[in-house]
Amino acid sequence: MLSDNIKKGVERAPHRSLLRALGLDDEDFKKPFIGVCNMYNDIVPGHKHLREITEEVKKGILQAGGVPFEFPSIAVCDGIAMNHSGMDYSLPSRELIVDTIEVMVKAHKFDGLVIVPNCDKTVPAALMAAASLNVPTVIASGGPMLKGKTPHKVGRKEEDLKSLDLITNFEGIGAYAMGEMDESELYEIECNSCPTCGSCSGMFTANSMNCIVEAMGMGMEYNGTAPAVYSSRRVLARQAGRQVMKLVEADVRPRDIMVKEAFENCLAIDMALGCSSNTVLHLMAIANAADVELNLNIIDEVSKRTPNLCKLSPFGTDYIEDLYESGGIYGVMDELSKKGLINLDCQTVYLKPIGELIKGKYGGGVIRPIDNPYSPVGGIKVLFGNLAPKGAVVKAAGVLPEMMTATLKARVFNSEEEAYESILGGKINPGDAIIIRYAGPKGGPGMREMLSPTSALNGMKLDTSVALITDGRFSGGSRGAAIGHVAPEAALGGPIAAVEDGDIIEVDIPNGKLNVKLSDEEIEERMKTVVPVKRELEGYLSRYVQHVATADKGACYRKES
């Protein structure tokens, strides 16, 4: 056992003495030591209940004959960090979480690992850490929030009642700015849209990644969909604790599970569900940690052959709890397998192939049959062109038909704040393409999510005629013609830095094209006079920009050559 490095032999007497200070005895020294990373904190609603989840994990480990050791890591709530400088820290927190887990596991020689994440960057960080450390690992997520509902009131008709989520709030600000909603209506949404703990209730980034954990084979069945407040979530956590002990005994490690074919399964699920565009960044970063080849071209190829089977919020009226009741991720995989779109032989934490686990799990409900999809192609599309020579990403499942191809006029901004002020100030017109640049991994730094601008556009009914294009990224809650991850980014001399107000932008999502109507010569000439926007940095961000890779490489830390 790895833990023999700290507990076996005469020379480890000092180490055992310190372990005895924790309450361990001779019998414990014979058992596997299992690290349990608990990302609980008091500021992230999706993590508020993780102490209880972690306790269940530890119970499972004890039941199966292991010794659990709990340790913490951090988490950022993207919703709370949105639309101010706090968002600069969201994506960079992913790498920091990976580092904290590495330090604890390497320093203390754990034989196995259970990671308890839930929101936004914590889940991809958990998978990256698992792939990098390669000790037997199970991911035990905290689960989604239940949807909110408008309250019954005297005189309110049944047909006027509606489901709510966090995005309803963000879009409500746009509606309020247009005079289509008064302050009391916005307040009602504010008070009722986030009714429980858990990751936000739609197919946003956190839930997208929790579903991908399950598709990858790195978590228990229903890891992605069982609501945070359901008792089944506690059962899953306890099962995860027992299962990691079986992985330790069998010496099955993350890289035995996280193979190329498993990544293809994740991408198929991504496309079928219409997941957040952030999954593109995260899956490439996870693949990098696992030494698996994954790039934008591969992602686009999977999208072309995978139908979109679900329309969950923000693009539909259904929620993660509805997906849970329809068979969950295994139900979607079962349906995809009928067209040969799932690699059935991939290993899982159950020590069984995924094909055996998903058979017969399709439950209908919010999952369309594969012969009647919402779209014959997947929910994410990769775009290339002279505006994005190394690629850009759009969540095509959320783009209205009239914006799938469009010729627009550029409105250029060098910060999210400037663009947001112009949107709410009524200065954006139908036919505009909002360009927000210097928001990339290095230029932002950290690739801010542009949920506030996209939500304002939707709330103001401009999603039918306006696109937002950025070298930053978008929340999983963003919808509309939101094109992000433009690479190269402006800070690295990408052509987006050369765009000027009034330039013609050509968007062709079906054919994967994104161009500015300028010749190569014109772009080159303009770039000679571009003065890059540089931000004063300190602390962690000043170190982060020295190591972060480009968006088309997953915006992870560059591996040393």
Image: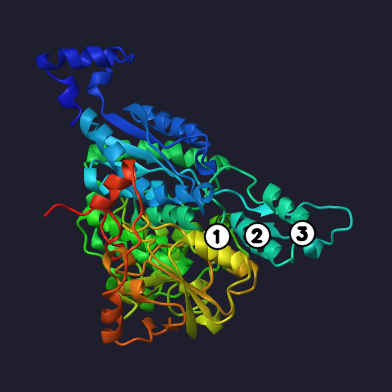
At label 1, the amino acid type is: Ser
State which quadrant residue 140 falls in.
top left
Q: Mark 1 = which residue?
A: 452
Q: Distance of mark 2 from mark 1, alpha carbons?
A: 9 Å
- Which callout, 3 or 2, points at the residue further toward the start of the chain? 2
Coordinates of residue 501 in the picture (x, y in percent)? 46, 78
Quadrant in which residue 534 is drawn: bottom left
Residue receiving disc 3: 182
Residue at 31% from the left image edge and 75% from the top image edge: 495
Q: Where's residue 73, x and y in %? A: 37, 36
Q: Is residue 474 left or right of residue 150?
A: left
Q: Nearer the viewer, residue 74 or 134?
A: 74
Check the picture and name the quadrant holding the N terminus.
Answer: top left
Label pair 2/1, CB-CB below 8 angstroms = yes
Q: Position of residue 226 (x, y in %)?
A: 52, 49
Residue 487 higher or lower than 126, as above or below: below
Q: Is residue 490 left or right of residue 5?
A: right
Discs 3, 1 touching: Cβ within 8 Å: no
Q: CA distance from mark 3 to mark 1?
A: 19 Å
In-front residue for pair 432/267: 432
Say which element carries label 2.
helix
| Label 2 or label 1, whichever comes before in sequence order | 2
Residue 356: give x, y in percent of width and height. 36, 58
Q: Is residue 26 something one can see in this rendering?
A: no
Residue drawn at the location 36% of the way across and 35% of the way down: 37
Crowd class of label 1 (few under 14; some 14 to 19; many from 20; radius 10 Å): many
Question: SS of the residue at dot 1?
Answer: helix
Determine the residue positioned at 18% across, 13% down.
Answer: 14
Instruction: Please give the residue where the numbered disc 2 appears in the rendered image.
Output: 173
Q: Quadrant of the C terminus?
A: bottom left
Residue at 26% in and 41% down:
136
Q: Residue type at mark 3?
A: Asp
